Every structure is written in structure tokens, then in C-alpha cells.
Image: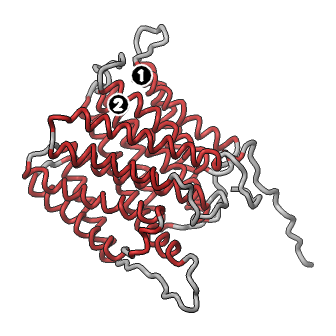
């Protein structure tokens, strides 16, 4: 007897922004990025009542940029990409809203703590305790649903990404443990561990998608009969060398600060990825902002590792190299990825981005120049360079919100779910 497969019920959600993870998490992260940077400008200049004895203000800033902003982008990307990789439906609708609310409640706790609010209790430490619960729920549930999808289809090649999510969970737990035990060094280790794992994810995912985006983007509109196929160079040897050098680099920088080892490992990461980037180059990228922005972000990461290699010998602050890597590898890379993914996954043309994208990416380049390069040549105006960088960051994400939030909150033009 012939079996009849009844049609399954199509997925639905109470609002388009809850259709897939990228919609709500990209929207929330972009808005949060504006709010947290505005608040940081007040904290940095001493205009809030943050309890600096409980949490060092610099660690407050670091935690929220890594485990607040960057981790939201990672969650949004993976909760969308894993569906494409495995074919398993990711949380949507109210389930996705529950995951997002865990992230949001944790962020509200950290923002209130940064302002020094205690809501009449007399101390603000309870805000961090509450944030810890929701933060660990957020990253725990996110990791679990991704792990289930990968395990279901036996796609074991994704275990590298799952291991990074496990390390991010550990890093965030170390941050909270350090706060609760009054051990600032433990909090510092948790923040730097999270930061370098995020950079590791960017290198891993970027290696997969940037060459693909360049090939697809440059091939669009070309006559298939006469145009030469665009093919960028990649190498398995480069992949292994980049991973090995980066792993050694972050262990040295975080746990065994030796200037010779730091220079060798950082220089190794820089050289391997400069060679890799040269293989991805095509002059046509400069006509397409969604491509040149990714290229510039990777180039900024290479320059950042060169700064790490030079820092012990030239005496400039370690934070210069760290912020260079954060701005290029977290800031510009995530903005560029969000700008492209948000178009493609909402059914819009990736070849016709909003006119504001060029300005957004130029503003992020200005952040790099003002926060990294200008302080290296003129420390007498350091506060001005910081303020300019903060202002350019805020302006970049305000433009992103204006340009992309409406499309992230609307149905796809083709009527499909996603």
C-alpha cells in the first residue's frame, strides 16, 4: 500500500521578529550597543554611581561588550545558520522569545548596576546575582538547542563551534565567580577568555563565509558565457596554521605572559592570515560595501596581531592592541555580517544594501583610527580620541538601527517564513 505523507504544519510566530534568531538578537544587540556605549561614556568620565569595589568599571565595560553585545550576535547567527547547516528547525516564536528574554534581563541587570541603581535595597550587588542567573540560562539553552540539532544529524564537524560555546559558558561563569568571590583577577581571566573565544569564532566562521560571500558577490550580474569565474584561494595548511598559532597566542597572552612567545605566536597569526587575505583579494570588492567591509575587518585583525607582536618591544599599552582586535574582529566584523545576513535572510537582495552602509562602515574605520592609531602618536589628547571613537561607534549603530530594524521586524517580501 502506498503511504501518504500528510503535510506538516508550517512554522509560525506571533511577530515576524521572532521568526528566526537573527531577527530578534541582531535588533536587540544593535540597540544595546548604542545604550551600553552611551552609558560607558558616562561611567568612564565618572558620572555614574557604579560600585567600583564590586566590579571594576573597565571589567563592567569588557563583560557587556563580550557577553552582552558580541554573544548576542553569535547567538543570533548560530540560531539561524545551524538551521541551514543541519536542516533542523531552530527555536522560533515564544521559545525564541524566552531565550531572548534571558539575555535581555541579564543586560538590564548590568545596565542598572552601571548606573548605580539599587532600587531602595541599599546595595546593587543583587543586580549582578540576578544577571548571573539569566545570563547562564541564556547561554546554556542556546548551546543546548544547537548541540541537539548537530547531534540529531550527526554533523560532527560542527563540534569545534560547540566547544567554543562551552568555553564561552565557562568564561562567563568565571566572570561571575570572580565578582562574587571578590577576585578581580578571576573576572579578568573570564573576560579575556570570552574575548579570545569570540575572536576564534570569528576566524573560524569568517574562513567559511567570507570567501563564499566574495565569490557570490563578485559573480552577480556577470555574463556566465563571457565572464571569468571568480575563485578565491584557500588552503587547509593555512587553516591549521592559523588555528595553532591563535591557540598558542591566546594561552600565552592570558596565562603565560612572555614577550618572546607573545611576539612569535602573534606574528604567526598575523602572517598566516595576511597570506590568507591576499588569496581572497579581488579589486572588484571595492565596488561592493558588503565585501570591502569584511575585507577591511579581516585586515584590521591582522594589523591587531602585529600590534600584539610589537607591543612588548615598543612599550605602548597592551590595551591598544586588544582594542584594535576588538574593534576590527568584533565591531566591524559583526556589523558587516549583520548587514549582509539581515538582507539575505529577510528575502531582500544582498546586492542592493541600504545607502547608509558605506557611512556605517566608514564610521567603524574611524573608531579604529581614533581608538587605536591616534593614541599611539598623540597621547596628550587621549580623552578626545576616546570620545571620538565612542561617538563614531554610537553613530554607526544608530544608522544600523534606522536602516535595518524595520526590515528585521517585517515579514519577508516573498511571504516565506524566516
The reply to whether residue 208 is in sight is no
Q: Which mark is residue 113?
A: 1
Q: Is residue 302 above or below residue 402?
A: below
The answer to whether 225 appears left or right of 111 in the picture is: right
Residue at mark 2 to residue at mark 1: CA–CA distance: 9 Å
Q: The N terminus lies in which quarter of the figure? A: bottom right
Q: Which residue is mark 2?
A: 60
Alpha-carbon neighbours of circle 1 within 10 Å: few (<14), some, or many (≥20)? many
Residue 85 drawn at (x, y percent): 57, 66
Q: Kindly state the secondary structure of the residue where label 1 is placed.
A: helix
Q: Kindly state the secondary structure of the residue where label 2 is placed.
A: helix
The answer to whether 238 appears left or right of 77 in the picture is: left
The answer to whether 400 appears left or right of 415 in the picture is: left
Alpha-carbon neighbours of circle 2 within 10 Å: few (<14), some, or many (≥20)? many
Residue nearest the observer in this picture, 168 or 144? 168
Q: Quadrant of residue 46?
A: top left
Residue at 35 percent of width and 45 percent of height: 194
Amino acid at each position: 500500500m502506498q503511504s501518504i505523507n500528510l503535510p506538516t504544519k508550517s512554522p509560525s510566530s506571533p511577530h515576524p521578529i521572532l521568526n528566526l534568531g537573527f531577527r530578534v538578537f541582531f535588533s536587540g544587540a544593535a540597540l544595546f550597543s548604542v545604550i551600553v556605549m552611551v552609558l560607558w561614556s558616562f561611567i568612564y568620565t565618572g558620572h555614574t554611581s557604579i560600585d567600583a569595589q564590586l566590579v571594576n568599571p573597565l571589567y563592567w565595560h569588557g563583560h557587556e561588550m563580550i557577553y552582552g553585545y558580541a554573544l548576542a550576535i553569535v547567538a543570533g547567527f548560530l540560531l539561524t545558520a545551524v538551521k541551514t547547516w543541519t536542516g533542523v528547525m531552530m527555536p522560533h516564536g515564544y521559545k525564541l522569545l524566552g531565550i531572548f528574554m534571558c539575555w535581555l534581563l541579564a543586560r538590564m541587570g548590568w545596565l542598572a548596576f552601571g548606573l548605580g541603581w539599587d532600587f531602595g535595597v541599599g546595595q546593587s550587588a543583587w543586580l549582578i546575582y540576578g544577571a548571573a542567573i539569566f545570563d547562564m540560562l541564556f547561554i546554556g539553552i542556546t548551546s543546548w538547542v544547537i548541540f541537539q540539532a548537530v547531534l540529531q544529524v550527526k554533523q560532527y564537524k560542527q563540534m569545534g563551534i560547540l566547544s567554543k560555546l562551552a568555553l564561552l559558558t565557562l568564561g562567563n561563569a568565571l566572570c561571575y565567580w570572580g565578582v562574587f568571590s571578590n577576585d578581580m583577577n578571576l573576572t579578568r581571566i573570564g573576560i579575556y577568555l570570552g574575548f579570545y573565544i569570540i575572536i576564534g569564532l570569528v576566524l573560524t566562521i569568517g574562513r567559511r563565509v567570507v570567501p563564499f560571500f566574495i565569490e557570490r558577490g563578485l559573480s552577480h550580474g556577470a555574463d556566465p558565457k563571457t565572464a571569468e569565474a571568480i575563485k578565491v584561494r584557500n588552503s587547509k595548511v593555512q587553516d591549521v596554521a592559523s588555528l595553532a598559532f591563535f591557540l598558542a597566542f591566546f594561552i600565552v597572552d592570558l596565562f603565560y605572559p612572555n614577550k618572546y612567545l607573545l611576539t612569535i605566536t602573534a606574528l604567526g597569526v598575523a602572517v598566516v592570515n595576511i597570506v590568507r587575505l591576499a588569496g581572497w583579494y579581488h579589486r572588484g570588492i571595492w565596488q561592493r560595501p558588503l565585501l570591502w567591509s569584511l575585507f577591511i575587518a579581516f585586515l584590521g585583525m591582522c594589523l591587531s596581531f602585529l600590534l600584539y607582536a610589537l607591543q612588548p618591544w615598543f612599550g605602548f599599552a597592551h590595551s591598544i592592541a586588544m582594542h584594535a582586535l576588538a574593534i576590527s574582529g568584533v565591531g566591524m566584523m559583526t556589523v558587516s555580517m549583520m548587514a549582509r545576513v539581515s538582507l539575505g535572510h529577510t528575502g531582500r537582495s544582498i546586492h542592493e544594501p541600504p545607502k547608509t552602509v558605506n557611512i556605517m562602515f566608514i564610521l567603524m574605520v574611524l573608531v579604529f583610527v581614533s581608538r587605536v592609531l591616534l593614541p599611539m602618536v598623540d597621547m596628550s589628547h587621549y580623552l578626545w580620541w576616546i570620545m571620538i571613537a565612542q561617538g563614531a561607534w554610537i553613530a554607526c549603530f544608530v544608522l544600523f538601527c534606522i536602516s535595518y530594524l524595520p526590515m528585521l521586524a517585517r515579514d519577508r517580501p516573498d511571504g516565506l517564513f524566516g
